[in-house]
Amino acid sequence: MGKDFGLDAILAELKPFGKYNIVNYALLLFPIYLAGMYGSVFVFEAPDINYRCNIPQCEGLNDSDWLEYAIPQEKNGLSKCEMYQVATNSSNTCKMDDFNRSVVVKCHEYVYSEEYSVVKDFNLGCQNWKRTLIGTVHNAGLFVSLPLTGIISDKYGRKLALSIASLMNGLFGFLRSFSTGYVMMLVFEFLEAGLGAGAYSTAFVIAMELVGPKGRVFGNTLINGVYVMGLMSLASFSWWLQSWRFLLRLIYTPAIFVVSYYWILNESIRWLLSKGRYPEAAAIIQKAAKINKVKLSEEVLSPLYELEKLNVPENKENRANDVSVEKEPSNFMKVIKSSIIRKRVAICSFLWITCTFVYYGLSINSVSLAGNKYVNFMLVAFVEIPANIVCLLVLDRFGRKRVLIITYVLSACLCISLSFLPKDQKWLSLVLYLSGKFSITVAYSSVYIYVSEVFPTNVRQSLLAVCSSLGRVGSTLAPLTPLLTLYYDNLPAIFFGSLALVASVLVFSLPETINVPLPDTVEEAERLSKKKNRTGSI
């Protein structure tokens, strides 16, 4: 930023949640609510449904006794993918003698249940890799969207990035509901996530830059709570509609209207200042003060008046004609040259990978919750609400680092304990599972807010996007962990626990950011670590 005039002091005088901030937060929480649904919608697009082999000579019979001698039994019921071979001397009357029960063959056609799923619509029976690939393709899109949106946000403005990402969400999500084939659906799945998933991170950054240090934790808790409401709404809508096509049309249509935020929402003051657009920043500050009915002190108003008088285009022209003024290196080059920032990006990325890896690993390797799948989904999502409330209570009291260390260690202990628990202890397994989800959610929320506090304003969203994108490596690798059981049954849980313990150790090398103003320049961000080294405390 070209001139520092204590923005956090101004935000404090404006009050963290005055009328201006409440209105802006209300606007920002809507795309965050939608993001809660978009991030997990593939769970209800491609659920695993019931189906069995199609046996032409037996279909249409009034009784189902023939299933016992036509389709082999498995531990969970009838086989989905196999049938007994039809005898060579079969009379095609669907009698027991028509099947050779000593020979099992693969199915060629399937009879699906009345449940709605792309498995049924695109005939994906016994092709689980294709079904799960839908979620994988969605997550792969995040590797594109987060850096792309971050670059647009840091270079052209937060509200432009939010508007474009939301438009892409709405457009490609709505079009996906009309998919006529599997490949067409995969293409739209990737485009929707690849071009639109950055809406959440953009809205999050705007919200964090909207308040001062004391308002960030509450704002983060509010954002996470609304995100969970999106998850629960997704399950509710899916349960009500019982159609993945209608579900997509319902939840993606509202995203198109978020494009209007480009004209409704005010640009981030911090971003404007980082770009030297001082008159615009000053105008928004005065507008906020008027809406909040706050009279700013003379100490704040004096430098504010100076900002209004700055003519940025003229100054740029004068600097261009003044050969004595050396051109400053770009913000990106400053970040590349800073060993402190490079190290911080690497560690924050690892913390993010650990969160996603343990989070999804718990889901994959834990006991399956019995009962209604929609209720179960809402229950697992609901656990995140008390976790975020705890996050609100502890982050400002104990600091970011201490909370991260404790939750990572707790997650590691719960993962390993869940692994060694006898399979018949279902209720205890459920308690440990929800406790693990609880602790990793606290860690995840803490990481998100912490990462937004340790990078400078002019590259904040770009570096946040880098960490978030690399973090998706965890959610991509987690489904592969069951392969580790080929070597040792408890190896996946031990792997999760070990990763969480390593993350807890790495947190010690990072600076504490409790009640610290957001750094606006690379130099300010570097000073966070220097303060840590001087104090030597967590």
Image (cartoon, helix red, strand yellow):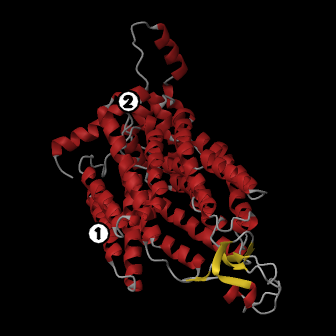
Q: Distance from label 2 to label 1 (Cα)?
A: 37 Å
Q: Is mark 1 on a helix, strand or loop?
A: helix
Res. 83 in view: yes
Q: Residue at x 75, y 66 (%)?
A: 121
To which quarter of the image does residue 115 belong?
bottom right
To which quarter of the image does residue 3 belong?
top left
Question: Which sits in the foreground, 444 or 474?
Answer: 474
Look at label 1 and name its amino acid: Cys
**In screen coordinates, is 241 left or right of 145?**
right
Q: Is residue 264 above or below residue 489?
A: above
Percent x, y of residue 21:
51, 53
Crowdedness of circle 2 by 10 Å Cα count: few (<14), some, many (20+)? few
Percent x, y of residue 15:
43, 53
Percent x, y of residue 52:
69, 77
**In screen coordinates, is 58 left or right of 461?**
right
Q: Which residue position is annotated with label 2?
A: 336
Residue 413: which disc? 1
Placement of the N terminus among the 4 image quadrants: top left
Question: Which sits in the foreground, 35 or 424?
Answer: 424
